[in-house]
Image: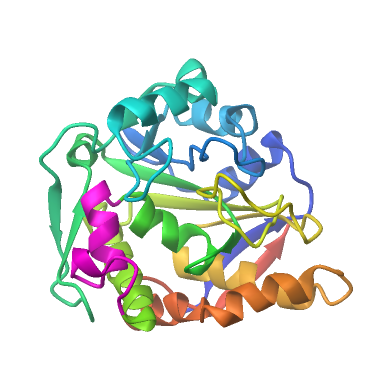
């Protein structure tokens, strides 16, 4: 069955909220709002002011997890400081989900590569999740969107290494590449299942660099801004973003962006997630 993906070419904080309301899904209880806090030095991540009307509307708590690589977000102390410097903790309640151990282990009995996922233990304090994604390229995964936020984004520091290593943390940067992509899909499924459908997804196609917001030194955006998408299906929303990039034939930066996606086989994460039943690659794009 095809999913609905709402789309607007207008990129404003107010339009984010409008598209969210089109979903008709009231997120219950305490809402975890997953954002990307942005590595120190990165110029492309979406700032707190952009997301504020949306986060406030659901009375959400901004959540993040520590990274598994060197930088300003790989320890609790440094990450909390980054959240402060970037304005997150001034604008919202903030919860570093894996700020203190032990991790919460989520089972993935149907996982193709990994059968368990390690997330910040504080995830257990939430009843629903709103995934706010900045759609852009990624140096390892090819692209970053909703599925990456669900997997790598909500994974603890150890969990990130476990996914990257396809179940072997010591192979964090040397695992079979497609197995890593499939591990991301497995991990995304565990989080979707954990919330029993109490989730919503917004992707913003703005500041689209080939590099992720996790890069302290990132290329400037190469594509023109495209718009905002909202869906209850994380597979459909990522597929729609990829399709919109392919449709942007007159954009001088399209070729460079697609080279990044295709050289990393980025669409395979979408393929693997769809095969697991995380969502559908078939969708109806409803332009607002």
The reply to whether residue 277 is visible in this rendering is no
Q: How many marks?
A: 0
Q: Residue at x 66, y 68 (%)?
A: 285
Q: Residue at x 59, y 49 (%)?
A: 22
Q: Is residue 204 above or below residue 64?
A: below
Magenta segment: does it hold 183?
no
Q: Is residue 40 above or below residue 4?
A: above
Q: Position of residue 75 (x, y in %)?
A: 30, 35
Q: Residue at x 33, y 63 (%)?
A: 188
Q: Quadrant of the C terminus?
A: bottom right
Left or right: where 124 falls relative to 205: left
- Res 123 → quadrant: top left
Q: Position of residue 140 (x, y in %)?
A: 48, 68
Q: Nearer the viewer, residue 205 or 81?
A: 81
Q: Nearer the viewer, residue 107 or 78?
A: 78
- Per the rendered image, the range of residues in magenta is 155-175
Q: Position of residue 109 (x, y in %)?
A: 13, 73
Q: How is the image coloured?
A: rainbow
- Res 192 → quadrant: bottom left
Q: Residue at x 77, y 72 (%)?
A: 254
């Amino acid at each position: 069955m095809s999913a609905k993906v709402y789309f607007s070419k207008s990129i404003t904080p107010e339009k984010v909220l409008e598209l969210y309301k089109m979903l008709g899904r009231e997120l219950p209880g305490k809402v975890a709002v997953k954002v990307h806090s942005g590595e120190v030095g990165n110029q492309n991540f979406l700032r707190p002011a952009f997301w504020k009307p949306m986060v406030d509307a659901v009375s959400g708590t901004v959540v993040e997890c520590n990274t598994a690589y060197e930088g300003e977000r790989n320890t609790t102390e440094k990450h909390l400081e980054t959240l402060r410097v970037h304005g997150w903790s001034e604008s919202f309640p903030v919860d570093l989900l894996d700020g203190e151990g032990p991790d919460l282990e989520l089972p993935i009995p149907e996982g193709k590569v990994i059968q368990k996922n390690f997330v910040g233990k504080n995830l257990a304090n939430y009843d629903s999740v709103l995934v706010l994604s900045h759609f852009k390229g990624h140096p390892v995964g090819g692209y970053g969107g909703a599925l990456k936020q669900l997997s790598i984004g909500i994974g603890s520091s150890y969990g990130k290494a476990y996914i990257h290593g396809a179940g072997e943390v010591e192979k964090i940067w040397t695992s079979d590449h497609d197995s890593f992509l499939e591990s991301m899909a497995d991990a995304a499924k565990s989080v979707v299942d954990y919330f029993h459908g109490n989730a919503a997804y917004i992707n913003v196609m703005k500041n689209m660099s080939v590099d992720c917001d996790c890069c302290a030194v990132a290329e400037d955006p190469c594509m023109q801004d495209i718009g905002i998408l909202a869906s209850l299906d994380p597979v459909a929303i990522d597929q729609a973003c990829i399709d919109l990039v392919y449709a942007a034939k007159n954009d001088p930066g399209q070729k460079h962006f697609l080279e990044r996606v295709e050289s990393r086989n980025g669409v395979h994460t979408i393929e693997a997630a769809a095969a697991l039943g995380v969502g559908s690659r078939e969708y109806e794009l409803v332009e607002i």
